[in-house]
Amino acid sequence: MKRNLALLAVAAALTATPAAAQQTTLNVVTAGDQNMVDYVKDFLAPRFEKGNPKATVRAVGTGPGDAGSQKIAEKLQAQKGNPAWDVDVAVIHQKMAGDLVREGLLAPYVKDVATGKLVTSESSKNALGTNVTGYVIPMFQSQTAIAWNPALVKAPPKDYDELAAWAKANPRKFGYNGIKGGMSGVAFVVGWVYANTPDSERLMKGPYDASTKAKWDGALGKLKEFNRNVVITPGNAGTLDMLNRGEIAMGPVWVDMFYTWMADGKLPPSMRLQLIGPGMPGQPMYYVIPAKAANMAAAKKFVEMATSPEVQAEGIVKKFNWYPGIDAQHVKAKLDDKTWNKLFVDVTPKDLAAKGKTFPIKQYFDDILESYERRVLN
Amino acid sequence: MQDRGRLGVVLVAPALAAVLVLFVYPLGYSLATAFEAKGGGFTFGNFAKAFEFYSVDIGFTLVIIGLSTLLIALASIAIGGYLTLGENPRAVALLRWLYRWPLFIPFVVAAQCMRSFLAKNGLMNNTFVALGILEVDQTTGFLDWRGIVITFVWKQTPFVALLAAGAMASLDRSTIEAARNLGASRLRILFEILVPQIMPTLVVGLILSFVTMMSVLSVPLMISGESPTMMTVDMAFRINNYGDYGTANALGFISYLLTAACAWVYLKRQVRQ
């Protein structure tokens, strides 16, 4: 009797399975700040569920910065032996994308997605030195620049040298968040190394040579000197807070954060941006699909929707002030001029092309941070 | 008899398993990783790196937390003392009601509040300027090591004060009355009669505070971006930016030794008594 019951239960479970399989839950795991989770949860999920009534999107955030991507990577590494993984779509930073491709944890899905053809940027092929062609579609491109307060600064510096001179003449009026408090500070330091060392191209493109860092002592010594005259702020938001309160007159920020804070009334509308030469880094975030995602087909559909020109225009550019992840010409057609131009008032497309750099390849990136710890902090 | 013994094992098993799985295993794992080289194998390299890069930060952490602990001790003695010896019942009631508030506020919220309160043009300085106490150009921000100390003291004092005030309240009041009858001042009663008697409780509270503060990441991260910084920030940085658990665990091991030393001093004292 007992056995019959058990058989019955198994039979019931088997017949129930197809029905349950039709109702899929798509796990979209995103690194980054809360706004990334909100974007998936409030903007993308309802759209996707409308077009796919049998799917539910579950948005999960893993926290800001590279640490968030690190958590996603650790989760995938831990599931490596399982037949199906519980992450269907992940949004990760550039630094981790290369590692995941090398470890074979991502699916080469771009060829199966219609919007894959709209992607042209360099960052869709190369993630800090690793070839990621076919594995990633940029969700957006983000850029750092120097924010400045016209009430306190007459003319903003045009490059790192002018900035250093300005900071010397105006002690404690420039602020940045060092390297331990967020990526805008890291970007500023990377830009400084690019500006003050001879082979910045090599840092971005490789090949890696462990002896290169020995040539940075002069640049970092100068940075240590520079740091004496500036304020070290607590975090990306700390820099914006201090700008807002008028405690500093200038500081490096993420362009999208800058515009979002301004739209929320947390920064005066008079604040301006300047992308200084020879250049400051920016980075994309990528949509990736793990190699053994449980809902592969739905995941591809989701990314296709998220990278369509309409969604990139409405969500990425208009709502969140990011630069589009797919080729800008497809997105521009979907937007009115006013919205489009707002994004390019201070940082023109020409500036972006000339001075929007990438972060260095991973080994050099680590070397820069560690050399900063060694030479500037100690 | 054997059955009772077995029952005892069954009863203690869930708790023991929880301690083993959730505490002993992760602790052992992190201690072991501190001595593990990147490719595997035993090494002291992580410690060499921790000291090379972060010896200043280790010292800084001890100074900041030591100073905070000292200030917490003084503030709790003052609060406990006034609650026990205060003569104005309204002031005592007000203080009793007010001092516990920070106890219920998490560190991260405290840090967020202090971040806008202590800034150069923050709430505190703006209030001083509005009251005419300071001029705008005289203000300074406290978002550096001072801000960390202020936040720690603000957040941890109620906890220690709660223990100290409780211990003071349960003392035999006749000694206080006797001292008062002989003309001792309240300050003298506090430091010569109350504090010596509640010392064991006070020290327990301070050690618990010390250990708690050693583990806080949000406060140093949110209040001050400056260098030197506290060990917790370095550990987070090591993991987040380099994926380097080895050095982070070595730093964790060092901070574990520091707290263990602190506990050892206390235990030795207890045994002597």
Image: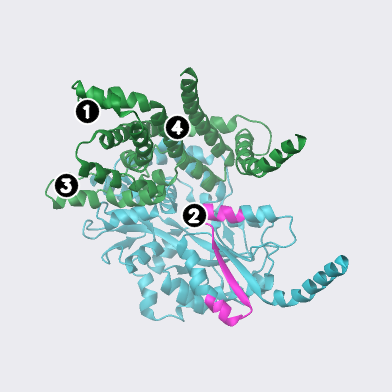
Q: Residues within 10 Å of mark 2 (few under 14, many from 20)?
A: some
Amino acid carrying label 2: it is Gly
Element carrying mark 4: helix
Q: Colour of chain A?
A: cyan
Asked if marks 4 and 3 fall on the same chain, the answer is: yes
Residue under pointer 2 = A65
Q: Which residues are magenta?
A: A46-73
- For the residues labelled 1 and 4, the Cα–Cα distance comes to 40 Å
Residue A350 locus on image (x, y percent)? 40, 67
- Residue B186 is tagged as 1
Chain B on-screen colour: green
In this view, the mark in front (4 or 2): 4
Against B33, is A130 above or below? below
Three-letter residue code for mark 4: Ile
- Horizontally, residue A314 falls left or right of residue A101, namely left
Secondary structure category for the residue under label 1 = helix
Tell me which corner region of the image, top left, top right, bottom left or bottom right, holds residue A130.
Answer: bottom right
